[in-house]
Image (tube, helix red, strand yellow):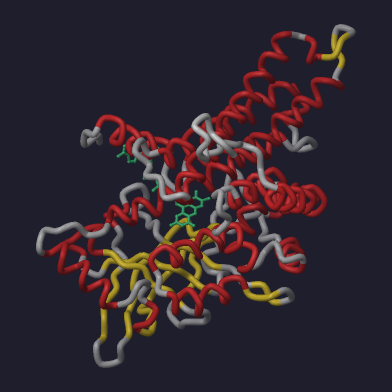
Amino acid sequence: MSGPDGGSAPQFSLELGPDLREMRDWVHAFAADVIRPAAAEFDEREETPWPVIEEAAKIGLYSLDFFSHQWLEPSGLGIPVTFEELFWGDAGIGLSIAGTGLAAVSVVGTGTNEQIGEWLPQMFGEPGDVKLAAFCSSEPDAGSDVSAIRTRAVYHEATDEWELTGTKTWATNGGIADVHVVVASVEPELGSRGQATFIVPPGTPGLSQGQKFRKHGIRASHTAEVVLDGVRVPGRCLVGGKDRLEERLARVRGGGRSGGQAAMKTFEASRPGVGAMAVGVGRAAVEYARDYSRERVQFGRQIGQNQAVAFMLADMQAAVDAARLLVWRAAWMARNGVSFTNAEGSMSKLVAAETAVRVTEQAIQVLGGNGYTRDYPVERWHRDAKIFTIFEGTSEIQRMIIGRAVTGLDVR
Ligand SMILES: Cc1cc2nc3c(=O)[nH]c(=O)nc-3n(C[C@H](O)[C@H](O)[C@H](O)COP(=O)(O)OP(=O)(O)OC[C@H]3O[C@@H](n4cnc5c(N)ncnc54)[C@H](O)[C@@H]3O)c2cc1C
C-alpha cells in the first residue's frame, strides 16, 4: 500500500485474515455441536470430559500441531480466537482442552529444543490415546505469593537426578495428567529467584493425587492437589538445563539480575489467552440474553423493548467488545515483540475477567427466574466466569502489576 509520500505505510486492520477466519469457524462449529451439548452434564457430574477431549483429538483440535500452529500465528491472534470459541462453548470443557496448552507453554518459554521435542508430544498424546499435562506452581501457603513456594528440589550428583518433595495445590489436570510441570525451590534463601521448573515424566513413582476439589464453577475441569514424595527425575528434566540454572543462581548470589523479569514477561504474554477465555464466556452470556430479550413478552411487548433491558444489553455488548480489543492488542504486542510498558497483558486479563463476571450476572437478570435455574445455561456461565478473577493472578494482583507499571513505584 502506498502512503502519502509514495512510500509504504504501515497497515492497520482488525479484520482477521482468511486463515484465522476459517480456523475460528471450525473451532466454533466444534464448540456449538460437541462442547455445548455436553456442558450441563459434565458440570453436574464434575467429571473430566474425556469423550469430548477424544473427539477434539480426532479432528486435530486437541493436538500439539494445532496448538503450536496457533501459538506461532504471526498476528498473535491464533490463541485468543481459539480460546474465545472454545470457552464460548463451555469454560469447564474448554479448560480441559486448553489446560495442557498452558502447561506446555511453561516448557516452551524456557526449555531447550530437546526438552520441547521430547515432552510436548507426550503432553498431548494421540487420537485414541489422549494425554494431559498439568502445571503445578501453587501451594497451600503460596498462592499469589509465589516466592513462598516450599516444594524443594535437591540435586543428587552421583545419579544425576533431582529429588522433589512438597505438596502442590489447585493443579488443573493434577494427578490425571501424564506430564506434570512442577515449580520448586532449589535455593530457598533466594525466594522466587532460587526457583526452577521441572518436568515429571509419566508414571514417576512418588507423585500422587491428593484431594480433588469440588468447585463453584468450571466443574468439568479437574482441579486437585499433587503430592510429591521424594519424586526422582533425571537431570535432563530441569527445564532450561543445569548450566543455565547455575549461571542464573550465580548472578543472583552476586547481587545481579536473575532473569526474573523474563519470567514475568512470559506470564504477561500468556495472560491475553486467559482474557480470551473470559471473553468467550461473556460473549455467550450476551448472545443468550439478547435472544431471550427478543422472545420473552411481558406487558404485551418484548422485554428488550424496555430501555432498562436494552441499555443493560448495550452495556454488556460494549463491555465484551472492549475486553476483546484489549485482549487482541496485548496478544498482538506479545507476538510482535512490542514491550508491555503499561502491563497491557495484565490489563487484558483484568478487564476481561471482571467483564465476564458482570455480564453473566446481568444475563441472569435479563432471564429473570429462568436465569436462576439450571434449566438455562446462564447461571452456569456466571459460576464459571468467577474463576477468571482468581487464577493466573487474581484481579488484585493484576491491578498491582498495572499500578506498578503505570506509576513506576513499588506498589504493594
Ligand atoms: C480452579 C482453579 C484452577 C487453578 N489452576 C492452577 C494450576 O493449574 N496451576 C497452579 O499452579 N495454580 C492453579 N490455580 C491456583 C491459582 O492461581 C491461585 O488460586 C491464585 O493464584 C490465588 O492464590 P490463592 O488461592 O492462594 O489466594 P491468596 O493468594 O491467598 O489470595 C486471597 C485474596 O487476597 C488477595 N491478595 C493476596 N495478596 C495480595 C496483595 N499483595 N495485594 C492485594 N491483594 C492480595 C488476593 O487477590 C485474593 O483476593 C488454580 C486455582 C483454581 C481455583
Q: Position of residue 88 (x, y in %)?
A: 69, 43
| Count of numbered marks | 0
Q: Position of residue 225 (x, y in %)?
A: 47, 62
**Nearer to us in this view, 35 or 43:** 35
Asked if residue 303 is positioned above or below residue 152 in the image, the reply reads above
Name the residue: 62% across, 23% down. Answer: 318
Please identify the quadrant where the C terminus is shown: top left
Asked if residue 274 is positioned above or below residue 131 in the image, the reply reads above
Instruction: Tell me, yes or no, if residue 309 can be seen here.
Output: yes
Q: Quadrant of residue 257?
A: bottom left
Asked if residue 164 is positioned above or below residue 185 in the image, the reply reads below
Is 84 situated left or right of 250 in this image? right
Is 73 situated left or right of 53 in this image? left
Name the residue: 53% across, 69% down. Answer: 175
Q: Quadrant of residue 374?
A: top right
Name the residue: 33% across, 36% down. Answer: 400
Please identify the quadrant where the N terminus is shown: top right
Q: Farthest left residue?
A: 254
Instruction: Tell me, yes or no, if residue 41 can be seen here.
Output: no
Is 174 situated left or right of 250 in this image? right
Q: Farthest front residue?
A: 6
Q: Farthest right residue?
A: 300
Name the residue: 55% across, 40% down. Answer: 328
Q: Position of residue 28 (x, y in %)?
A: 75, 48
Q: Position of residue 217 (x, y in %)?
A: 61, 44
